[in-house]
Image (cartoon, helix red, strand yellow):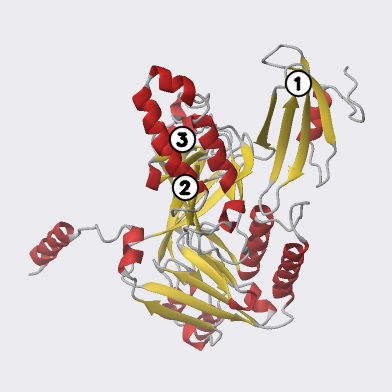
Amino acid sequence: MMDNGEDEQIDVRSVVEAVSADHSFGAPLYVVESMCMRCHENGTSRFLLTLIPHFRKVLISAFECPHCGERNNEVQFAGKIQPQGCCYHLNVPAGDVKIFDRQVVKSESATIRIPELDFEIPPEAQRGSLSTVEGILARAADELSALQEERKKVDPKTAEAIDQFLSKLRACAKAEAPFTFILDDPAGNSFIENPHAPSPDPSLTIKFYDRTPEQQATLGYLADPSQSEGGLGAPSAATTTSTPHGAIGATGGHRAIAQSNNTDISDNLFRYSAPEEVMTFPSTCGACTKQCETRMFVTKIPYFQEVIVMASTCEDCGYRNSELKPGGAIPEKGKKITLCVKNIADLSRDVIKSDTAGVKIPELDLELAGGTLGGMVTTVEGLVTQIRESLARVHGFTFGDSLDESKKNKWKEFGSRLTKLLSLEQPWTLILDDELANSFISPVTDDIKDDHQLTYEEFERSWEQNEELGLNDIDTSSADAAYGSKETAKLP
């Protein structure tokens, strides 16, 4: 082992075991002797497991060779690949120098684009790094200009074109021209800092998306389920079983039974659920890619609409997932649901939040854009708990050295206010704003009109909202004509 002053060197196995363990913030610095890939002498690698404020746990590694001066550093993620990919759009106006100080975490699978320059940094060009917007642009400019002198001798035209592009890139890096900074990561492990968190950032938009089979294959997943070990000989046809589900306990049901009214008994007992036909078909586990089963059924929720419930379980790794999709036609109007939470019973209300619904809590100045938490079936208490856990993972209530005292106090205050919601120290308001009207909060009364704490408000979608949802390009005239002709033919 080499003697590096105060750094105590340990073996590689100890580093791997320490990094794999669930450390809290403040893990020690590990120093390992390793070979330099330039001069093949022994150099020193340092590993630090840390938490990036507003992000998640990462492993920072740095190598230095005292013989040839070779140095490099890299950021790797100590956690897992996220369920969805992420795409950050940062609008950088001209003259705004502060926006260049935002932290940027680029994973090794992320792509950076600047559409105004027709410029793209592919994943293989820059490995995982922790930098700023200015640092990313400066590094790209330095790498492009590294061999310009040799290039001018061999290919003057290409060198001249690169010089012109570098002037535009450096103009963007100095905030002399507006541009859009796009960070797209299929693994979902990249990040651009929001200095206004937990409030929305007017310059930054985040979108989460499902990975394509090609992106899955790039990340090391099996794109074709038939390639997995359990793929051969798996049943291809779906099997159907008739299984009762759900629970009944409405006050109206007891009243109908007491009055021996058969019609009311039928209407009330099957109000919230009924024996449905459950479809069971083979699928692939999203965690271990082994064969598993997915169950699906269609049911009608009172005061809401027809929905499709899907649930998957994997016997190999224990992964479980449930999902709810809207059924029927796309509603003509959006819906805004407002609930005034006053007592413990309100925390137990059923909540269906679609993947297009935004969540607002005015008392906290909290606003989550549509798609932030995905679609879920939960309760009011479960939704607030999910928001708190999501903010703790993405924005973090744990603080690093780079977070100043004012931001620390702001996060501590916000965390305490979010916790007070569940203790019901004062009434608060929950708002679900859904452009597709696929969200729902259950009433506590038999008739939804008698629930004065719950209000539903329909609104017309704007052209921009329809465009984002892809509804402006839908043409159903031929289908409407076909259905109309069938109904006319059935008339006597």
Residue tagged 1: 65
What amino acid type is highlighted by mark number 2?
Ala
Quarter the N terminus occupies: top right
Residue tagged 2: 171
Of labels 2 and 1, earlier in sequence is 1
Residue tagged 3: 215
State whether residue 192 is above or below residue 120. Answer: below
Other residues around mark 2 within 10 Å, as few (<14) / some (14–19) / many (≥20):
some
Q: Nearer the viewer, mark 1 or mark 3?
A: 1
The answer to which of 220 and 440 lies nearer the viewer is: 220
What amino acid type is highlighted by mark number 1?
Cys
> Which residue is at a point 42% across and 34% down the rendered structure image?
163
The tally of labels here is 3
> Which residue is at a point 69% across and 57% down the rendered structure image?
392
Helix, strand or loop at disc 2?
Answer: helix
Other residues around mark 3 within 10 Å, as few (<14) / some (14–19) / many (≥20):
some
